[in-house]
Image (tube, rainbow, N blue to C red):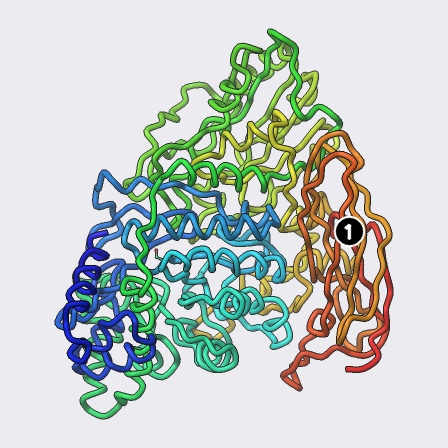
Amino acid sequence: MKRYLITLALACSLACTPKSSTPVYLDPSQPIEARVNDALGRMTLEEKVAMTHAQSKFSSAGVPRLGIPELWHTDGPHGIRPEVLWDDWDQAGWTNDSCTAFPALINLAATWNRDMALLYGDCIGAEARYREKDILLGPGINICRTPLGGRTFEYMGEDPYLAGQLVAPYVKGVQQNGVAACVKHFAVNNQEMRRTSTNSIVDDRTLYEIYLPAFKAAVQEGGAWAVMGSYNLYNGQFNCHNHRLLCDILKDEWNFDGVVISDWGGCRDDDEPITNGLDIEMGTWTNGLRGAASNSYDNYHLARPYLERLKDGRATEEELDGKVRRILRTVFRTSMSPEPHFGSFTSPEHFQAAREIAADGIVLLKNDGVLPLKLHEGARLLVVGENAYKMMVVGGGSSNLKTKYESIPLDALQEAFDGHCEVVWERGYVGDTTTDYNKVVTGQDLSESRSAAQLMADALEQARMAEVVLYIGGLNKSAYQDNESTDRLDITLPYGQDALIEALAQVAGKLVVVNISGSPVAMPWASRINAIVQAWYGGSEAGHALADVLTGAVNPSGKLPFTMPLALADGPLKTERQYPGIKPEGETWWQEYYDEGVFVGYRWYDTQDIPVQFPFGHGLSYTTFDLKDARVRKAGDGFRVSATLTNTGSVAGAQVVQLYVADPEASVARPAKELKGFQKVYLKPGESRQLSFTLDKQALSFFDADAHAWVAEPGDFQALLGFSSADIRAVVSFTLASK
Ligand code: GLC
């Protein structure tokens, strides 16, 4: 607000100043490029260089002499990080920066709902603007290549089309608040293990078909104003100054006109950043990776070393001007935007949005009719599991948040059943007793004196007396359990949960399991459970959202954004060189080979006919749906596929109709099916809706690396319509006559 008032005062003073004497860069009515050129022409060399690197932990310099403010960057993808110290990760201890914690992005992905993505972006963008932040360091959209990926919870699943379709509205939502969305981490950054020392070796077809499309959608459909380079190397060059990724692809092929910033400490060289597309070096201490004196921002690669190179001719002012133009463009799009933006913070609307998004992404995996919960008057509902109680907005890494309040499942369930039946809780196991992260605290006491055996015995004793047992467990964003900088070590549930679930299944009348995680987990007990729900880190309203679904206040409509395999070994990563990488003799960095190519997630399991626990795109409802009259017809250069969806059940609900394409005659090995369309449709009982999908040639194409072009080969294709990648309800065939 403060900076807006300054800008407003400036604008008012301008209004009283004769037009001719108003500097163009300060005149919001002027075209943005004219403002950029005018400002650039007024800057000194030192002022230009200062803009290209951090001046504090989360800000990069402006031009005070010209009244151009610094740029404030903020994590993260799920909410606005509490203010940190000028030159440290620890909290500044403000009392007015408790935000709305929105659901983890994997939860948004599970909604398969473009409207929810726009709503999410608009709310988080408003919170960033209110907190006077200009660049939101999110969303993260790296593909889930391995279920072990430590930041899978922060990303949007295993399919590039799904991620691309959701990231674009999220970016638009953020930026309509005068805040730059900074999509990350560009690119092929698909694990946390050795994330700053691993070289991703990927062939071009895989790069263009799997790992680039979501970023391309963010830039070209979402209009992203910022991109963050990733810590890893790609084809031997660090990604925060990777010429091929940042110059050839992002800025040249995609015409990206925004700003490229480094991940914190991701800039690793004095010379490459100058010519390889990095615009702002952010980080920690000196060049971000080595500990050194604090406040040593002048030691950054794009600081004193850069100035020296400019002065001795090793670098040109033209390159520098290219960076500063992008930075100034970002300033004129955000804090000095022509449209005034005020933002809003922790409003009832934002918490309601968080609750709706969280619920819309909860996935009903299995249900024998025990859900929605119907309990007799005075009955006992036993809730077992640490995740019913543990607050999980705090933790996980840089997406850690200090939220105004967090609704936990146990409280929400007691609220929902208050006056109707008794809700009791047994912890069942001890997972993570941490209650703080970066000095943000939850205030809970998770200490426990009972042994594991006693905890289980207490739960089983209670289970015998309950009408229904509701198990709420899973992972918890602690180290190795969905956490930045550590990958998971396997997909088995930790803390002895499988044994506890099996024991409960023996004694419970009815057992519902809710798995709260941000990545796939093995469910060896699935056949012995009445109902299974996949919930996510749902943010401030996690508890209410889960209770809404379990009680039937909300009919579940979420769909899995990744495959739940039966076993990790069933996946496509069979060798150490594929994951987590190898270090051959003489190599400085770890080498990771994406030998599986495009066969990631369901592209692998479906093509290899490998059975899975629950397939990509799977999710049930409390109602039923039918899909009929599927047909395909030529439409211009492409094809139009249509079908009629009907709610054949007794309650209103939503279905996500998914469209996959198969190219059985391809001259290259292509996946059995590839997602190329989806629509989420809410219908009343008995209501029908005709759906229509467009398949253009791009949707039929594979990437020909030799030709460096997308190719749609003439021949027969199939369009598969269904409610998951494995639940195909209709197949229509068509022939593409010519390229
Ligand atoms: C972290 C993360 C990045 C985050 C940045 C600032 O290392 O990789 O996602 O935005 O640093 O916290």
Q: Position of residue 316 (x, y in %)?
A: 27, 89
248 left or right, relative to 635 = left
99 left or right, relative to 104 = left
Please determine whether, in this image, residue 25 is positioned above or below residue 514: below
Nearest the viewer among 701 and 459 is 701
View quadrant of ligand 1? bottom left
Please determine whether, in this image, residue 609 is positioned above or below residue 330: above
Task: Tell me the amino acid under the disc marked 1.
Answer: Gln
What residue is drawn where x is 37% and y is 50%?
126
Identify residue for label 1.
690
Q: Secondary structure at mark 1?
A: strand
What residue is drawn where x is 41% and y is 19%?
449
What is the tally of numbered marks visible in this picture? 1
Q: Within 10 angstroms of label 1, few (less than 14), some, or many (20 or more) residues?
A: few
Q: Position of residue 578 (x, y in %)?
A: 60, 64
594 left or right, relative to 323 = right
Q: Position of residue 407 (x, y in %)?
A: 44, 30
- Looking at the image, which residue sits at the far left? 65
Nearest the viewer among 695 and 343 is 343
Q: Quadrant of the C terminus?
A: bottom right
Nearest the viewer among 504 and 260 is 260
Query: Is the residue indicated by label 1 positioned so its CB lies within 8 Å of ligand 1?
Result: no
- Looking at the image, which residue sits at the far top? 378
Please determine whether, in this image, residue 375 is positioned above or below residue 286: above
23 left or right, relative to 481 = left
**Does residue 57 appear anywhere in the picture?**
yes
Please determine whether, in this image, residue 245 is positioned above or below residue 487: below
**Does residue 592 appear anywhere in the picture?**
no
Residue 305 falls in which quadrant of the image? Answer: bottom left
What residue is drawn where x is 53% and y is 33%?
545
Q: Position of residue 597 (x, y in %)?
A: 66, 69
